Image (cartoon, grey):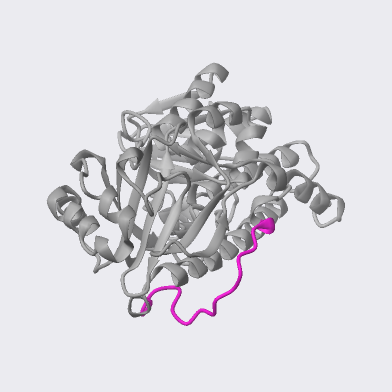
Amino acid sequence: MSDEVAIIGAGLAGLTLALALHQQGIKSTIYESRPAPLNIGGAVMLSPNALKVLDALDLYQAVRAKGYNFDELEIQKVSGELIETYEFGSKEKYGYPGNRIYRFELIDIIMEEIKAKGIAVVFGRKFARVVEESDERVVWESSDGQLSTVSFLVGADGIHSTVRKYLHPEIVPKFTNMTGITAAVPTASARHLGQPITKPLTILSEKKGAFVVAPQKVDGSEMLIGKQRRMEELSREGWDQFSADKESLIKFLQEDADAFGQVAITATKHINPDKINVWPFYVIPELDKWASAKRRVVILGDSAHAIPPSAGQGINQAFEDVYMFALVLAASRAGRVDFPDALTFWQDYRQGRVNKVLELNKQIDLRRLPKDQLVGVMAEGVARQDFDFTWLYAPDFKADIENWIKSGGAAKA
């Protein structure tokens, strides 16, 4: 076999998985249908649970140096009255401050390490189907008709995953009827209650919902601004047209600015059309399996559990997936566990954390959305609870795996 693991998708999850496997002495090759890594969207929020993974892969210092580091987000009324503080990190409490970094910069950091490690990345080769799967191997075909035989095939190809269709041909991503519309503007152009913006803010209007502000770039000289819009699902062509109508998107960000006060008025005054992003929120139902019956085909990240961005945990949870998968695969190769048992543990552990993130999302949407927009969304009917982040930001993945192995639940037959 030419490769131990074939990774489908050269996004953040797929690239990071290759590094995690390499660290465990497991060879892999990444296959990407596009001519370069997918680099859509602007900046991403990284919390301590993900930064711990990046640190374990020797990537954290480069990420810290490129991103905007911060500890908390404040939820305020238009008057400036503090409603609540949302932690996104803390070196003292969790080992790392939160970090907001441009996706392309994060990909560049990971790709540099991929090249340094000599990990193969094949661009322009699109996964088509699984041809054959046995207890020891999987044969897959790309759209050009080329066949490859590997020990494992991992789908890290996003919410519209082609690999997932092999496991769940009936699953179609579901639109949540909410879309995030954001823009990047110079921080110096905005003021909040006469003061410059120095930290992420969510300004709440009882009738209009939330206006979100998040500084980015190392020095905080740029910031994301955004609102959510309730709308019906569009076709792919419809989304393209919607995203291309910059004038309407700018108008949406500017409308009702008075309801959010000075920060919205000043931040939306001059918006560069090239700096606008549209993010439709899609989810998939909880899946009963992230692996095939013979355990040779696996999905992870958005392919297995697409998470709306309310809590900023999408990519963070994907990093948890890939790091733990590499650890359990390495443990099975070392003869310490049966891989089917380890894979079941991995999925159950990861699904449990994803479910808690989805509950956290509901709490955030409950705070951000006007009551009339809660109808028909995931947060409808949810009782408000205080935030607790210790479970999220301070996991010990290696210890949890070791404890499971030592408990005897993974004893080899």
Q: Is residue 353 visible?
A: yes
Q: Residue lying furthest bottom in this view?
A: 381
Say if the magenta span includes residue 41.
no
The image quarter in which residue 51 lies = top right
Name the residue rendered at 32%, 46% in the picture: 190
Q: Which residue is drawn at the image coordinates 67% and 27% (left, top)?
A: 25
Camera-side residue of 181 and 307: 181
Image location of residue 122, percent across then percent down: 41, 26
In the displayed structure image, the side of residue 267 where residue 327 appears, left or right: right
111 above or below 202?
Answer: above
**Which residue is at 29% across, 66% downward?**
259
Specify start and end residues of the magenta stretch as a single range.
Answer: 374-391
Q: What x and y, as percent, mark residue 285?
A: 46, 67
Q: Is residue 376 above or below residue 403?
A: below
User: Is the stretch drawn in magenta largely helix, strand or loop?
Assistant: loop
Quadrant that contains the N terminus: top right
State whether residue 207 is above or below residue 143.
below
The quadrant where residue 97 appears: top right
Is residue 362 shown left or right of residue 281?
Answer: right
